[in-house]
Amino acid sequence: MKRVSTALLKAAVIIIGIPVLVACIFLVPEIANYTAELFPDISFMKYLVLFYLYIAVMPFYFALYQAFLLLSYIDHNKAFSELSVKALKTIKYCAIVISIFCIIAMPLFYFMAEYDDAPGIIVIGLFIIFASLVISVFAAVLQKLLQEAIDIKSENDLTV
């Protein structure tokens, strides 16, 4: 039963990564072109946006990789190990970095929304910030609980 649930979660992690990959291939160049139209005086704006968005996606994929590793540790009965704590800590830091990247990009979201008269763009940016902060807090709580469980387990192993 445990292998089936972790396999399902691994598939979900892969499925989460696919739309972001598709967006990176098709949507990010369009956003860069749109930004170049928005700021015609700044000649390198298109490449700056491309570089920034592709760099901002890296922590997302690294967090997905860490989640995949965490599920592998569960499969191999290493859920209560320092490796799991380290994976949760990395997921927490990746989520914080994603939030910081989006906070830095909020002025760009504002100018795009102002130019296109679409305030939904700002809401999307705020949603990404909020979601990644929730993930970082959740990962921090799980990390702390797992560390306490490991500490209790090691104390019990020493007393026997």
Image (cartoon, helix red, strand yellow):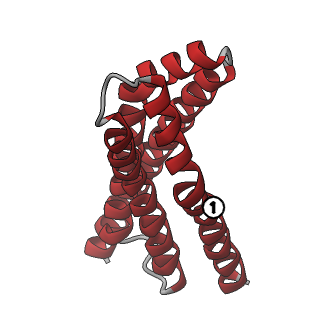
- 111 or 36, which lies in front? 36
Q: Tally the numbered discs.
A: 1
Asked which quadrant contains residue 106, the reply is top left
Query: Residue drawn at (32%, 75%), measured in percent from left and top?
Result: 157
Asked which quadrant contains residue 23, the reply is bottom right
- Give the amino acid at mark 1: Ile
Visible in this render: residue 66? yes
Q: Which residue is mark 1?
A: 16
- 147 or 53, which lies in front? 53
Residue 114 % position (x, y): 57, 12
**Of helix, strand and loop, which one carries label 1?**
helix
- 5 or 144, which lies in front? 5
Visible in this render: residue 148? no
Query: Residue drawn at (62%, 30%), measured in percent from left and top?
Result: 124
Query: Could you classify mark 1 by the number of other residues whose Cα lies within 10 Å: few (under 14), some (14-19), or many (20 or more)?
Result: few
Vertical placement of residue 116 versus 13, above or below: above
Asked which quadrant contains residue 118, the reply is top right
Q: In screen coordinates, is 47 left or right of 23?
A: left
Q: In screen coordinates, is 46 left or right of 14?
A: left
Residue 82 % position (x, y): 30, 68
Query: Residue drawn at (33%, 44%), measured in percent from left and top?
Result: 47
Vertical placement of residue 146 versus 8, above or below: above
Residue 20 % position (x, y): 57, 57
**Residue most extreme to the left:** 158
- 4 or 109, which lies in front? 109
Work out which quarter of the rendered image holds the C terminus and state it: bottom left
Work out which quarter of the rendered image holds the N terminus and state it: bottom right
Residue 148 % position (x, y): 37, 53
